[in-house]
């Protein structure tokens, strides 16, 4: 089974997250998408995170009927791993727990821009496909640089050390753009 791991704080979850999960299922070879709620993203300020159980429950509520179709799941898998949680460790643990599954990481274009800051990012690039969806709020020129839209990169470049991914980085150029972000929602709600 091919499973997309769409990780995030989901602080809060919104229709952009759920809409992208549905789109990925309809337009790629993935059989399922698991929304992997991160209890603590090491690259984010912990003081702005809502309680992890609250974020998990809100994500489950947001998926609702989609879970009945058994194609989109909300996972607390990282809640049971040593903290802080790192994606490379999560992927290793998932591979041990579900050896029959093939995992693909789903990230936003903004995360690709800072991918060199992720712990063991090269391990991820060497061992997993990475689906990258477009984001309005990209990190600019920091970190990795992206190839032209619509291209299959032969190399993900970065100022110093990111090398060619063995599994493949696939840009979801046809994905819809959702004009919403958790950061904007928190600002509007004064959280």
Image (cartoon, rainbow, N blue to C red):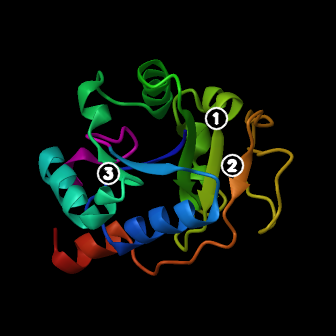
Task: Please determine whether, in this image, residue 119 is positioned above or below residue 46.
Answer: above
For the residues labelled 3 and 2, say whether their Cβ atoms are less than 8 Å apart: no
For residue 27, the mark is none
Residue 58 part of the magenta segment: no
Quadrant housing the N terminus: top right
Name the residue that disc number 2 marks.
144
Task: Please determine whether, in this image, residue 137 is positioned above or below residue 74.
Answer: below
Name the residue that disc number 1 marks.
128
Residue 42 part of the magenta segment: yes
Q: Comparing marks 3 and 2, which lies closer to the viewer?
A: 3
Classify 10 Å Cα crowding around label 1: few (below 14), some (14-19), many (20 and above). many
Classify 10 Å Cα crowding around label 2: few (below 14), some (14-19), many (20 and above). many
Query: Residue 52's spot in the image, x, y percent?
Result: 18, 45
Name the residue that disc number 3 marks.
9
Which badge, 1 or 2, is on the more N-terminal residue? 1
Task: Please determine whether, in this image, residue 179 is positioned above or below residue 174.
Answer: below
89 horizontally vs 138: left or right: left
Q: Residue at x 50, y 28 (%)?
A: 88
Find the magenta span and give its range. 38-49
Label 2: element kind = loop
Label 1: element kind = loop
Query: Residue 29's spot in the image, x, y percent?
Result: 64, 53
Identify the residue at the far front of this view. Answer: 69
Which image quarter: residue 81?
top left
């Amino acid at each position: 089974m091919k499973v997309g791991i769409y990780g995030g704080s989901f602080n809060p979850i919104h229709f952009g997250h759920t809409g992208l999960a549905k789109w990925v299922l309809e337009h790629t070879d993935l059989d399922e998408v698991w929304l992997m709620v991160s209890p603590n993203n090491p690259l984010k300020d912990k003081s702005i995170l809502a309680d992890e159980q609250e974020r998990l429950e809100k994500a489950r509520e947001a998926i609702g009927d989609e879970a009945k179709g058994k194609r989109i799941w909300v996972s607390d898998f990282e809640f049971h791993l040593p903290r802080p949680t790192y994606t490379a460790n999560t992927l290793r643990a998932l591979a041990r727990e579900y050896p029959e599954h093939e995992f693909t990481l789903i990230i936003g274009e903004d995360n690709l821009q800072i991918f060199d800051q992720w712990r063991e990012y090269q391990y991820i690039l060497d061992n997993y496909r990475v689906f990258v969806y477009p984001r309005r709020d990209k990190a600019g020129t920091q970190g990795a640089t992206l190839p032209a839209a619509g291209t299959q990169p032969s190399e993900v470049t970065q100022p110093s050390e990111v090398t060619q991914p063995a599994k493949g980085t696939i840009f979801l150029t046809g994905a819809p753009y959702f004009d919403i972000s958790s950061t904007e929602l928190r600002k509007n709600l004064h959280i």
